[in-house]
Image (spheres, helix red, strand yellow):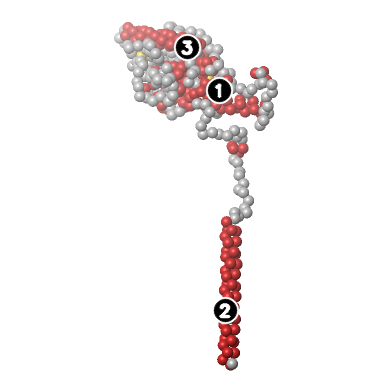
Amino acid sequence: MEEEKRAKEDDNKKEEGEEKADDGAAADEKVAEVKDAEMKADDAKDDEPEETEPPKVELSEEEKKLNFLQHSVPDLTSTVMNQFMSKFSLPAKSEGFDQVKFEWQGEKASAEYLTERLQDMKTLARLESLQPGKEFTEKLSQWKTSIEEWNGQQRDFQAKQQTAKKDKKEGEEDAEEEEVKGCDIFSVENVSDVGGGEPLFANFQPEDWKLFELRYEMYLLCHGFKKDVEDDAHPGIHETLLVYYYGKYFKKQINAKNYGKDTNKEMLELVKDTMAVDDKSMVVCLKGEDLATPEIFLKLTEETRRERQRRIDAGDETARLKFTPMLYKPQPAPQGEGGDHSDNQHHGHHRNWHGGKGGKGWGKSGGYRPYGKGWGK
């Protein structure tokens, strides 16, 4: 009986142990489930974006002024834009519209924007379709005739001077050895004869003829361009386009380096009584377009020649001009009439100068001729 009782007690203890083991396993399982749920919750929190304020965008002053998106590819090519931009305008009721609305800016502000925008574009636009007009062509032809006549008159006068010196008897002294001051330049009525058959330009050296040429050609170019462009609002020729339009109008090149200068502005300072470059880098002519003949430019050239000679005689070597030999070899403009011209072709008509003060002038081969026969064809 005791053995049965003990066996039953052992069975009961065994069952209790198994029950406790099952309860412990269940508890461990539940703890594991709780931990797993907590880990998943933590992971979910990590995946959630942090709640931060969006970055503030700050525009520059230039960006604030822009009303239109700037595209990398333009709607029109530069050639087409430059050709037709002078015809751009705002729509108006007079064109048949029932109503014209200005959503972003009023009509006045829009008109001001368009005007300002067109002016900026015109300043640096190369007008490739532009051609010299009839008035410019006629004045250029007259200029060529005048320069040839004046140059011939200088040669004739200098030849007479040489003959007179040879005819003097041995031992005969010159009437006057000292240099005589010239006449009042701007009171001269006939530049071909200021007295005794002497032309006002009798003492012109090759550099004087080139400065005379620079004055008058720039005068013709500026006024001819303004008339031919047929746009009263066009600002004129920008310094960076001076070489391009010079080639288009005169069919030859111009290079500031040949004048001993680094820039077009410095080159034009050689003729500052006629030309200038303003604070907006626009080429400006200081003489009105109503001049009938180029004589005023000849007088200005003689005035500066005398002043330069006076300074040189006084020992001021900085007054000497430093023109290169290439300046006296006119070069045709490249195919396309304009652009930045390089010194790679040397054509035209070059005349040898037997120079210096009181020299004989241009040699037997002919006088100073900036435009040879058939030039520019």
Crowding at label 2, few (<14), some or many (≥20) Cα neighbours within 10 Å?
few
**Residue carrying label 3:** 137
Crowding at label 3, few (<14), some or many (≥20) Cα neighbours within 10 Å?
some
35 to the left or right of 248: right
**Which quarter of the figure has residue 248?**
top left
Q: Pinpoint residue 170: horizontal percent, then vertical percent.
A: 30, 9
Q: Which mark is residue 18?
A: 2
Label 3 residue SS: helix
For the residue marked with disc 1, what is the amino acid? Met
Could you tell me if residue 25 is visible in this image? Answer: yes
**Which quarter of the figure has residue 310?**
top left
Closer to viewer: mark 2 or mark 3: 2
Crowding at label 1, few (<14), some or many (≥20) Cα neighbours within 10 Å?
some
For marks 1 and 2 on the same chain, the one whose residue lies earlier in the sequence: 2
Find the distance from the CA under tag 2 to the CA under tag 3: 123 Å
| For the residues bearing labels 1 and 2, Cβ distance under 8 angstroms | no
**Residue carrying label 1:** 85
Tell me: residue 339, above or below residue 147: below
For the residue marked with disc 2, what is the amino acid? Glu
